[in-house]
């Protein structure tokens, strides 16, 4: 199980940099190409991850670097034919590797959640909250002011300067909870107070980030803040978190205990956990706290 999660985590961190490849092409999707992509991503991610660990850095840094090297910024620039052959700019082909990446992300977040000590987080909630607020506020203000003071020549659409400023503030203030979880695990901080503070801060940052993104997207799409859509997203997120941390925990414990006591198969509990993970992921999709859901 852990080996599968680690392999999926390599894909989850390396693929996004590659998946932004180029414009669509008319090539057909291919399972052979998909397997080649997975093999190359695992190989490059593992080798560069090993290199980073040997110099005292988290392996995820090497995996992210592998995504950049295999993407259009490096391989596509110096050897575009090879990059297009391995990662065809075909929406169907890209959706196949993206599906693998999304599964890897879910597995990674599942593992991070299983290693999170909510009792400890409850005891250090003040430190986590103050760290999160200060970690968001200062970078967001700096990014927002940068967007407001940028010369008009550097702003794609000067009439939408507010959108640019909000985007820069959000980009600078929000950390990826997925990458944070990997770093905490690889640095062996998951069972320490520091690691739990970092994870709790990342979760809070992610929640606040979705609220800011909801406001920014509403402004970009309608020229004003759509209180209905933003309110629905914020309310849905808050209710999801409240139910998950209260009633949801008891239901999950009861289901796991029932499965463990009444099923013969050793994999029954793992199957249940994966089903619960899928159900939670679908719920977040429905309430709109995911980029794909917002695009629709």
Image (cartoon, grey):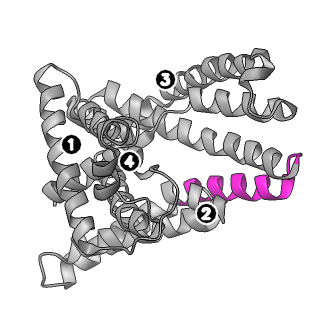
Q: Earlier in the sequence, mark 4 or mark 2?
A: 4
Quick check: can you spot residue 92?
Answer: yes
| Residue marked by disc 4 | 18
Provide the secondary structure element on which disc 1 rests. Answer: helix
Instruction: Say whether residue 119 is magenta.
Output: no
* Comparing labels 4 and 2, the label whose residue is closer to the camera: 4
Q: Which residues, given as a range, are shown in magenta? A: 223-243
Determine the CA span between mark 3 and mark 1. Answer: 34 Å
| Residue marked by disc 1 | 45
Foreground residue among 270 and 71? 71
Seen in the picture, residue 41 relative to 261 is either above or below; the reply is: above
Q: Earlier in the sequence, mark 2 or mark 3?
A: 3
The x and y percentages for residue 174 are: 55, 33
* Comparing labels 3 and 1, the label whose residue is closer to the camera: 1
Provide the secondary structure element on which disc 3 rests. Answer: helix
Provide the secondary structure element on which disc 2 rests. Answer: helix
Determine the CA span between mark 1 and mark 4. Answer: 12 Å
| Residue marked by disc 3 | 127
Question: Would you say 279 lies left or right of 87 here?
Answer: right
The x and y percentages for residue 287 are: 64, 63
Q: Residue at x 18, y 35 (%)?
A: 49
Determine the CA span between mark 4 and mark 3. Answer: 37 Å
């Amino acid at each position: 199980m852990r080996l599968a999660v680690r392999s999926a985590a390599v894909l989850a961190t390396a693929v996004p940099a590659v998946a932004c490849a180029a414009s669509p092409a008319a090539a057909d999707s291919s399972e052979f190409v998909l397997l080649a992509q997975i093999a190359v991503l695992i190989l490059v991610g593992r080798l560069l991850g090993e290199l980073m660990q040997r110099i005292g850095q988290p392996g995820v840094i090497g995996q992210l670097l592998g995504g950049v090297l295999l993407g259009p910024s490096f391989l596509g620039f110096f050897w575009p034919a090879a990059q297009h052959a391995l990662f065809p700019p075909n929406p169907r082909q890209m959706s196949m590797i993206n599906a693998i990446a999304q599964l890897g992300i879910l597995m990674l977040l599942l593992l991070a959640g299983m290693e999170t000590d909510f009792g400890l987080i409850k005891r250090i909630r003040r430190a986590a909250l103050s760290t999160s607020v200060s970690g968001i506020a200062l970078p967001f203000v700096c990014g927002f002011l940068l967007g407001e003071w940028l010369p008009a020549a550097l702003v794609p659409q000067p009439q939408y300067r507010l959108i640019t400023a909000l985007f820069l503030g959000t980009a600078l203030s929000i950390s990826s909870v997925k990458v944070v979880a990997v770093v905490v695990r690889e640095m062996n901080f998951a069972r320490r107070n520091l690691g739990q503070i970092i994870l709790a801060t990342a979760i809070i940052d992610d929640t606040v980030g979705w609220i800011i993104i909801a406001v920014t997207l509403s402004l970009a799409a309608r020229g004003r803040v759509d209180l209905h859509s933003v309110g629905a997203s914020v309310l849905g997120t808050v209710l999801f978190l409240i139910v998950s941390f209260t009633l949801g925990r008891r239901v999950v414990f009861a289901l796991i205990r029932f499965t463990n006591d009444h099923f013969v198969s050793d994999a029954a509990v793992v199957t249940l956990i994966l089903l619960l993970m899928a159900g939670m992921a679908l719920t977040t999709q429905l309430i709109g706290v995911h980029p794909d859901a917002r695009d629709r």
